[in-house]
Every structure is written in C-alpha cells, then in structure tokens.
Image (cartoon, helix red, strand yellow):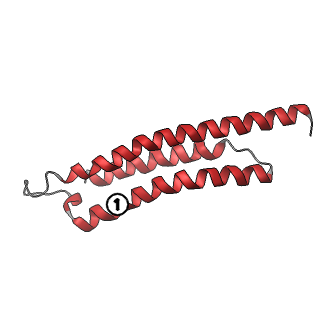
Amino acid sequence: MTTQTRASRTADIVVAWLLYALQLAGEALLVLFWLTSVMMTDSCGSVPDGLRVCDGDYFATWFFAYAAVLLLAAVATPIALIIAGRRGGRRWPWPVLAMILLALASAGYAFLFTR
C-alpha cells in the first residue's frame, strides 16, 4: 500500500467516524423529538374532528416504528463502516446516507402525526 493510499484511507476512516459521531448527536436530538411527540395527542377528545393520531393503534404503530428507525440507524451505521473497511470500500457515505434517511423518516413521522 502506498503512502498516498494509506493517507486517503486514514482520512476516510477519520471522516467516517466523525460523521457517525455527528449522526449520533443528531439522533440524540431526534430522540427528544420522538419523546415529545406524545404531546401531539393532548388535543384528543377536545375537538369534534380529531386527528388520526388520536387512534391509539395508529399512534403506537408509528411511535414505535420511528423508535425502531432511530435504533436501526445507530446500530447499522457502525456495522456498515466496519464491513466497508474490510471490503476496501469508502466508509464516509454510510453515515451520510443514514443522516439523509433519518431526515426523511423524521419528516414522514411529523407528516403522519399532523394528519
């Protein structure tokens, strides 16, 4: 392995794990969003035209599905980083992909709870 190849691999490793740390910091904020989403049910029963979130099964399904997405992203990303490293691939796209998917999942979660 040449010095330049070794340096680029080292940079890839450092950037990938820093991005993963950033992902985890973002997920810590999303966990707060997830926990406080319970308050979206506060108006249930006080208005005649209730939101779909007032249905207990609907709420529980999406509440726990979003929790599973958060947990899956936190666990799957380091596994993907390790596998990519063993196969000689780039590591940095995995935490970036996870952050993009978490943003989309969060937007979808908020959309589902406002219907």
Residue 9 image point, x, y percent: 79, 38
Q: Quadrant of residue 16?
A: top right
**Residue 66 located left or right of residue 58:** right
Residue at (7% x, 54% y) in the render: 46
User: Which is more toward the observer, 110 or 23?
Assistant: 23
Whether 1 is drawn above or below 59: the answer is above
**Residue 3 located left or right of residue 26:** right
Furthest toward the bottom, the residue is: 57
Residue at (14% x, 56% y) in the render: 44
Question: Which quadrant does the N terminus fall into?
Answer: top right
Which residue lies under the disc numbered 1? 62
Question: Which quadrant does the C terminus fall into?
Answer: bottom left
Crowd band around label 1 with a 10 angstrom C-alpha radius: few (<14), some (14–19), many (20+): some
Q: Quadrant of residue 13?
A: top right
Residue 11 image point, x, y percent: 74, 33
Residue 99 image point, x, y percent: 52, 43
**Residue 47 located left or right of residue 82:** left
Residue at (46% x, 52% y) in the render: 70
**Residue 104 located left or right of residue 95:** left
**Amino acid carrying mark 1 in the image:** Trp
Residue 34 image point, x, y percent: 35, 49
